[in-house]
Amino acid sequence: MIKQTLPDQTHIAYQDGELWIEDVRLSDLARQHGTPLFVYSKATMLSALAAYQRGFSGRKAQICYAMKANSSLAVLQVFAQAGCGFDIVSGGELERVLAAGGDAKKIIFSGVGKTRAEMRRALEVGIHCFNVESEAELEVLNEVALSLGQRARLSIRVNPNVDPKTHPYISTGLKGNKFGIAHERTLATYQRATSLPGLHVVGIDCHIGSQITQQGPYLDAMDRVLDLVQAIEAAGITIEHIDFGGGLGIDYNNPDEAGLPPPADVLWAQLLARLDARGYGQRQLMIEPGRSLVGNAGVCLTEVLYLKPGEQKNFCIIDAAMNDLPRPAMYQAFHQIVPLHPREGALSCWDVVGPVCESGDWIGRDRALNVHSGDLLAVLSTGAYCMSMSSNYNTRGRAAEVLVNGSQAHLIRQRDTVADQMRGEILLSAA
Ligand SMILES: *Cc1c(COP(=O)(O)O)cnc(C)c1O
């Protein structure tokens, strides 16, 4: 049976027998807005960001929040106001940044499948650069830029071929992977880029994976990227900025996960020492953290609908499901699940599952809980890759979201209505 514990370094804690986020009782929010409900702590996001800012103090560095982790407008607004740029992967994400008041000049556009229309729009609004992921994309970007009478700023995403030692679905920097340009093709690709009139090379980029808990893979990737910078610059091409991607893991309090990820400032002290040793410490640096900025800032509140004790398994059926919290079904990911009001008495073992008609719809297995139907639970560490990956499967409306700042709670997204879900659909006309 897996014991339920709270993560450190967050503003989520028990006080007077119930769970609070900052200065707000989570049960009050559940009562007011219903469940399932995502609740985020602004202070936790800003303290995660502050760890990176401390790590980079005195350096030329731009933090670009990888917004696919959580792209809700008010979350983007928090990071934009704190000076962040954004790493985007679609034209839709670009429009979200602009709607949230983000600065187009601090946007980097990643992703293996940018369309011409997406490139055009990004050039029109003047983003910082494109992270180009293939030689074919280079040619298309050149054409689109020329058609607008512009030169597109770009960096090339290289695949350093290092193993980030994470789940295979979230590992991106290995050879057999769809991302980036192979190490061996890098110099030739840079030479091609400088020969095209619609392109302006500004940087180099890598991103090796997600939920990385060790510093070794980062140091290896950094060495490989710096070797490439050396070779590219020896060929007479200037690299203005070096982008080391994102991927730093968070503590999910997973009993199966051996090592804890290093704090961002500790990791970057190591990486900057390596950069200094190799003479690149004063370069313009960029990073693209996602999960580590928002993951532990969010909880998902849910109500226990039914208890279904059985011979082999006890099921605790909650009103949140895989459409709200897709990570367990997708990656066998682990989330702590804790009661809002812990009860006295014996714990028993429960599989916590949602109402969706799939056996894959489980949220936590073998959890030690003392629960009754009607109780409220919090699924922890759900600030990243939950709402942004949520769906309407089973025609379930997507959850509402609240952002807490001290004692204030702001509703930042209304719960989907059924009408929201049917909008845009068209019945066949009567024959
Ligand atoms: C997803 C992604 C990131 C962020 O990854 P995290 O693990 O959330 O930090 C950064 N850069 C690129 C290119 C990505 O695709």
Image (spheres, grey):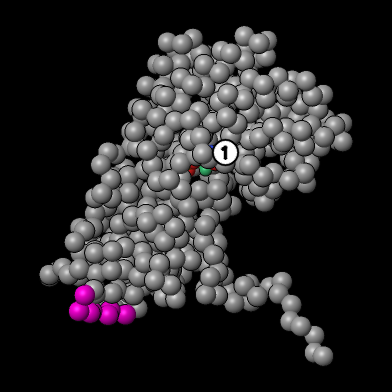
Q: Which residues are magenta?
A: 306-312
Q: Is 310 in the magenta?
A: yes
**As drawn, 258 above or below 92:** above
The location of residue 138, given as percent across then percent down, is: 72, 32
Name the residue: 16% across, 68% down.
347
The answer to whether the beta carbon of the residue marked 1 is less than 8 Å from any atom of ligand 1 is yes
Visible residue check, residue 287: no
The location of residue 115, given as percent across then percent down, is: 73, 46
Q: Tell me the residue that label 1 is attached to.
A: 179
Q: Name which quarter of the figure residue 86 lies in.
A: top right
Q: Residue furthest left?
A: 346
Name the residue: 62% across, 42% down.
111
| Relative horizontal placement of residue 336, taking residue 58 as reference (left or right) | left
Q: Is 182 in the magenta?
A: no
Q: Residue furthest bottom?
A: 431
Dot 1 alpha-carbon crowd within 10 angstroms: few under 14, some 14 to 19, many 20 or more: many
Nearest to the observer: residue 173 or residue 265: 173
Residue type indicated by callout 1:
Phe
Nearest to the observer: residue 174 or residue 99: 174
Visible residue check, residue 93: yes
The location of residue 407, given as percent across then percent down, is: 40, 54
